[in-house]
């Protein structure tokens, strides 16, 4: 009898300590704190996956995708950066500007502009980050950090960074998607990745190269997202010098949306943004995320 009791207690203790060890390992995550240094901390509350919420909406999303793939869309009639349905600025007279930063990923686009991000945080500048799946995969730790910063709004920059087309349109030498199915895959695969990693449901989409045909834009709308481009070409794919970035931003109008990049730390983007921000503030501009800006319309 005593032997059975001892055995039962031993098994119970083993299960208890195994549970503690599992949760300790699971919750110890390397993250970045406000001073931009890395720490290891257990039980850190992150904006991570929320499985119950995701499971509630997953079936609805898949049903929507199924209907879109079965729909008979017309042939596209327009191709470019400003086709019908693409938002290029915020419709407001208030002196606000939305800084948006793309993270494109891939062999030449998976860098992380820490100087730029640290500056935005230190100065309290809200920004919208359009992030591609390839960049997330290459920078998972940084992605978790960015998603945990309240100043930043994370949005969808596609899966393979392709122009969005139903018949294979090409932009800047990059082959676009070639069918309704490929459009859906380019948008939804990254949407799911962002959702699963952060719990955030992306509401805005920008394609690789910011080119679309009008049917692809309609498909994004049917998926429940809005296509957002820009009225200020802030760094021309991170090719502008610091002075060119500064001058581009200083041409802002009320409701402007600036397109910049956060994945090219050797570019002039960070220095140009740092030079422009004080001058824009002197002109009376304030900075908003897209979500904050659209609420002003």
Image: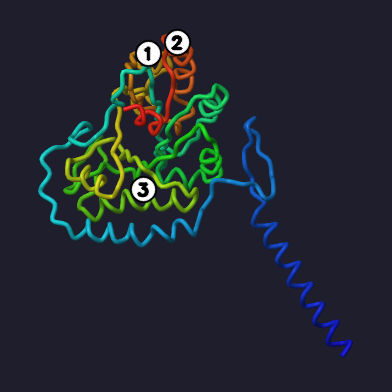
Q: Nearer the viewer, mark 3 or mark 2?
A: 2
Q: Nearer the viewer, residue 13 or 259?
A: 13
Please state the horizontal and vertical placement of residue 66, each as a whole percent of the image.
25, 61
Q: Nearer the viewer, mark 1 or mark 3?
A: 1
Q: Quadrant of residue 289?
A: top left
198 shown above or below 32: below
Name the quadrant of the N terminus.
bottom right
Which comes sooner in the sequence, label 1 or label 3?
Answer: 3
Q: Which mark is residue 250?
A: 1
Q: Is residue 124 left or right of residue 63?
A: right
Q: Is residue 122 left or right of residue 60?
A: right
Q: Which mark is residue 279?
A: 2
Name the quadrant of the C terminus.
top left
Which comes sooner in the sequence, label 3 or label 2?
Answer: 3
Q: Nearer the viewer, residue 161 or 151?
A: 151
Which comes sooner in the sequence, label 2 or label 1?
Answer: 1
58 shown above or below 2: above
Residue placed at 45% from the left, 9% from the top? Answer: 282
Give the CA separation, mark 2 to mark 1: 8 Å
Q: Residues within 10 Å of mark 3 (few under 14, many from 20)?
A: many
**Residue contact at pointers 2 and 1, CB within 8 angstroms:** yes
Judged from the image, the secondary structure of the residue bearing numbered disc 3 is loop
Q: How is the image coloured?
A: rainbow
Give the CA separation, mark 1 to mark 3: 32 Å
* Residue placed under numbered mark 3 in the picture: 159
Please state the horizontal and vertical placement of residue 2, each as a whole percent of the image.
89, 87
Q: Residues within 10 Å of mark 2 (few under 14, many from 20)?
A: some
Please state the horizontal and vertical placement of residue 36, each as a whole percent of the image.
62, 32
Give the CA separation, mark 3 to mark 2: 36 Å
Q: Nearer the viewer, residue 292 or 167?
A: 292
Residue placed at 46% from the left, 56% from the top? Answer: 53
Judged from the image, the secondary structure of the residue bearing numbered disc 1 is loop
């Amino acid at each position: 009898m005593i032997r059975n009791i001892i055995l039962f207690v031993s098994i119970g203790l083993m299960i208890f300590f195994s549970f503690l060890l599992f949760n300790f390992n699971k919750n110890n995550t390397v993250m970045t704190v406000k001073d931009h240094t890395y720490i290891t901390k257990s039980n850190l509350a992150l904006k991570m996956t929320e499985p119950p919420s995701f499971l509630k909406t997953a079936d609805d999303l898949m049903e929507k995708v199924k209907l879109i793939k079965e729909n008979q869309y017309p042939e596209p009639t327009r191709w470019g950066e400003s086709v019908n349905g693409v938002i290029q600025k915020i419709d407001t007279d208030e002196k606000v500007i939305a800084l948006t930063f793309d993270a494109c990923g891939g062999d030449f686009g998976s860098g992380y502009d820490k100087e730029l991000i640290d500056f935005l945080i230190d100065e309290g500048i809200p920004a919208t980050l359009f992030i591609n799946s390839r960049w997330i995969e290459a920078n998972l730790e940084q992605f978790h950090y960015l998603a945990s910063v309240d100043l930043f709004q994370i949005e969808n920059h596609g899966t393979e960074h392709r122009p969005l087309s139903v018949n294979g349109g090409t932009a800047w030498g990059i082959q676009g998607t070639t069918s309704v199915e490929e459009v859906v895959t380019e948008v939804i695969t990254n949407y799911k990745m962002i959702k699963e990693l952060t719990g955030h449901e992306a509401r805005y989409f920008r394609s690789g190269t910011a080119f679309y045909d009008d049917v692809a834009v309609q498909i994004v709308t049917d998926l429940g997202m809005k296509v957002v481009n820009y009225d200020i070409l802030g760094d021309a794919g991170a090719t502008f010098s610091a002075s060119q970035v500064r001058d581009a931003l200083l041409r802002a109008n009320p409701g402007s949306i600036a397109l910049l990049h956060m994945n090219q730390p050797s570019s002039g983007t960070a220095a140009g943004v740092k030079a422009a921000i004080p001058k824009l503030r002197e002109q009376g501009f304030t900075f908003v995320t897209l979500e904050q800006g659209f609420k002003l319309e």
